[in-house]
Amino acid sequence: MQNLTTIGFDADDTLWQNERFFRLTQARFADLLRDHAEPEHLMERLLAAERRNLGHYGFGIKGFVLSMIETAIEVTEERVPASVIGELIAAGQDMLRHPIELLPHAKGAIEALSGTHRVILITKGDLLDQERKLAQSGLGDLFHGVEIVSDKTRPVYEAIFARHGDGAARAMMVGDSMRSDVVPVIEAGGWGVFVPHGPAWDLEKADPPAQAPRFHELGTLAELPELVHGIG
């Protein structure tokens, strides 16, 4: 009997580029508001808006754009020009139209494991945007299941791995977010594999469960098949 039967993959910044486009848009935002706030202060205000708005808008581009607009209104004391609001909306639309850029080894890792394990895509964010990205990625047919969720927590993982596999104790989650992809799966009794990709968004940071025997950190997805087959 296999110890590990089911492998979940995060999508954004694990299989394809994502955070880079947010940072480019933030730079555009800072330039638009340069006469009203210093970039560092503006980013602090934006992060605060994103944090308090998560419960309203969830994760994703649309909530990000609304938080930028809210921040622009705040820092200009409600004097932000309509042209700036228009620019922010256009920036969000550009992000939603941006073609998918697969990360190295993403397709190869899934192909290498899909014949021996159930592979599940588990991603959070806006439903339409995540469906678009998956369709454009060309990876959809490689997965045995797809779950688009509002957040990634221990109960969410327990439910997903019970539905698609043999429970969290025989499951692994692979991703670039310590907070969302690693810690809650470790708490549920599974394996959490951290594959970092650039600077983490502040709201996705968490302390690594370094002492947990089922925690692993890899340099790239190319190392994942060897790790999985070593677990058995």
Image (spheres, grey):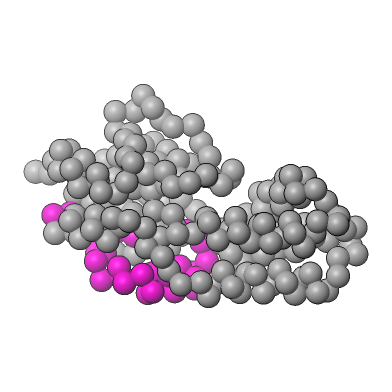
Name of the residue lying farthest toward the left: 1
The reply to whether residue 208 is visible in this rendering is yes
Q: In the picture provided, is 133 more to the left or to the right than 191?
A: right
Residue at image position (80%, 48%) is 38
Name of the residue lying farthest toward the top: 211
Q: Which residues are magenta?
A: 116-144
Position of 188 relative to 213 (above/below): below
Q: Quadrant of the N terminus?
A: top left
Foreground pick, 207 / 39: 39
Residue 45 coordinates in the image, percent (x, y): 75, 48
Which of the 4 image quarters holds residue 13?
A: bottom left
Residue at image position (54%, 72%) is 96
Residue at image position (31%, 35%) is 216
Position of 226 relative to 73 (above/below): above
Residue 177 coordinates in the image, percent (x, y): 45, 45
Instruction: Count every numbered label the image shows and give the total.
Output: 0
Q: In the picture provided, is 191 more to the left or to the right than 114?
A: right
Which of the 4 image quarters holds residue 143?
A: bottom left
Residue 142 highlighted magenta (yes or no): yes
The reply to whether residue 161 is visible in this rendering is no
Residue 127 coordinates in the image, percent (x, y): 49, 69
Residue 204 highlighted magenta (yes or no): no
Foreground pick, 68 / 180: 68
Q: Quadrant of the C terminus?
A: top left
Q: In the picture provided, is 108 more to the left or to the right than 11?
A: left
Residue at image position (39%, 53%) is 14
